[in-house]
């Protein structure tokens, strides 16, 4: 009897093993594997790059690329990743702030989905969520992106390690406190508009020109400033040319009086020859009564033309 019972027990165990094997065989395609990119605890580093033009915190992620917090002068904070071989399929990646492996049990914070594009900069996160990621790192948490892989039926996880983040964070704070209020793109082209028959600068005009002075004084790569005066078509050509000269010279005089070198400024005037809008109504004429200030880095700005009323960089 005991031998019979033993044989029945063995048969039941063998049957259970076969059932489990069959279940694993059929269910295994449903088990999605995961590839994780993360810097190991002893390899995690953060690097600060600081200037009055931009501040960045860079984190190397082995076999993936870099995670970057970037704050440019005159712009908002953003986060992005760079990679030479993007493992994520384009679409939307889930972004969560999860507990680090050495601090289990912390509550996961779900930040929703972020776009993933087919690029060497596949992920970009806007200011609000980038700030939440920073706060998570300061708390020892791990911002994590999860998205399907390109060609495999598996998920890809990219983790941003908090180890050594705190050591560079204060330097980053000092950097953003010293950023210029504007960047090159924001002052590369500045327009000052005038009332009819006038060449006087308003308080708002002076504020706009002060931004130009502030930036050029800080950026030695600006090699030339072109000041071009214009009018609408209301007066005679000789009068308009003289008026455009007065407008251009009023701007140049202000720039020089506030510290810019006259040697790098080229002052030009064109009368009504190069409108940016048809002189068919009051609104368009107001647009054409202008002086344009263009900043150039190592290039030249062509004379205005009908095709390019404010010149082209050569």
Image (cartoon, rainbow, N blue to C red):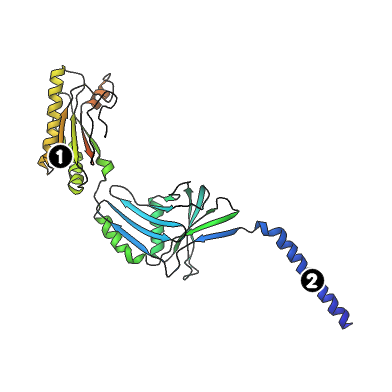
Residue 312 disc label: none
Q: For this view, does 92 lie left or right of residue 241?
A: right
SS at badge 2: helix
Residue that mark 1 sits on: 264
Q: Position of residue 228 (x, y in %)?
A: 19, 30
User: Looking at the rendering, in which quadrant would you find the N terminus?
Assistant: bottom right
Q: For this view, does 214 lie left or right of residue 11?
A: left
Q: Residues within 10 Å of mark 2 (few under 14, many from 20)?
A: few
Q: Earlier in the sequence, mark 2 or mark 1?
A: 2
Hey, which residue is sitting farthest right in the picture? 1
Q: Nearer the viewer, mark 2 or mark 1?
A: 1
Residue 186 picture quarter: top left
Residue lying at 73% horizontally and 62% vertically, measured from the top left? 23
Q: For this view, does 112 lie left or right of residue 261?
A: right
Q: Position of residue 195 (x, y in %)?
A: 18, 27
Q: Label 2 to label 1, Cα distance in Å?
A: 90 Å
SS at badge 1: helix
Q: Position of residue 108 (x, y in %)?
A: 49, 62
Residue 14 disc label: 2
Q: Nearer the viewer, residue 88 or 166?
A: 88
Look at the picture and state if 204 lies above or below 130.
above
Q: Position of residue 177 (x, y in %)?
A: 25, 56
Q: Nearer the viewer, residue 307 or 275?
A: 307
Q: For this view, does 164 lie left or right of residue 302?
A: right
Pointer 2 with pointer 1, Cβ within 8 A: no
User: Looking at the rendering, in which quadrant would you find the C terminus?
Assistant: top left
Residue lying at 37% horizontally and 67% vertically, measured from the top left? 164
Look at the picture and state if 271 lies above or below 63.
above
Q: Nearer the viewer, residue 169 or 136?
A: 169
């Amino acid at each position: 009897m005991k031998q019979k019972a033993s044989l029945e027990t063995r048969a039941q165990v063998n049957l259970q093993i076969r059932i489990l094997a069959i279940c694993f065989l059929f269910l295994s395609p449903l088990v999605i594997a995961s590839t994780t990119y993360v810097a190991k605890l002893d390899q995690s580093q953060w690097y600060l790059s600081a200037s009055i033009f931009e501040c960045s915190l860079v984190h190397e992620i082995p076999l993936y690329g870099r995670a970057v917090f970037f704050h440019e002068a005159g712009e908002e904070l953003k986060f992005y990743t760079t990679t030479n071989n993007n493992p994520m399929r384009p679409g939307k990646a889930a972004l969560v702030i999860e507990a680090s492996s050495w601090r289990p049990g912390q509550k996961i914070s779900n930040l929703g989905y972020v776009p993933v594009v087919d690029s060497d900069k596949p992920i970009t996160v806007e200011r609000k969520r980038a700030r939440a990621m920073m706060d998570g790192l300061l708390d020892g948490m791990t911002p994590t992106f999860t998205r399907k892989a390109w060609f495999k039926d598996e998920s890809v996880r990219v983790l941003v390690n908090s180890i050594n983040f705190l050591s560079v964070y204060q330097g980053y704070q000092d950097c953003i406190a010293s950023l210029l209020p504007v960047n090159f793109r924001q002052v590369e082209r500045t327009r000052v508009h005038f009332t009819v028959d006038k060449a006087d600068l308003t308080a708002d005009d002076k504020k706009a020109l002060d931004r130009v002075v502030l930036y050029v004084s800080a950026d030695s790569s600006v090699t030339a400033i072109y000041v071009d005066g214009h009018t609408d078509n209301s007066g005679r050509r000789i009068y308009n040319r003289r008026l455009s000269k007065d407008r251009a010279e009023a701007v140049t005089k202000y720039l020089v009086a506030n510290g810019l070198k006259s040697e790098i400024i080229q002052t030009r005037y064109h009368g009504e020859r190069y409108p940016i809008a048809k002189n068919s109504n009051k609104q368009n004429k107001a647009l054409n009564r202008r002086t344009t200030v263009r900043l150039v880095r190592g290039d030249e700005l062509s004379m205005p033309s009908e095709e390019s009323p404010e010149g082209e960089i050569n």
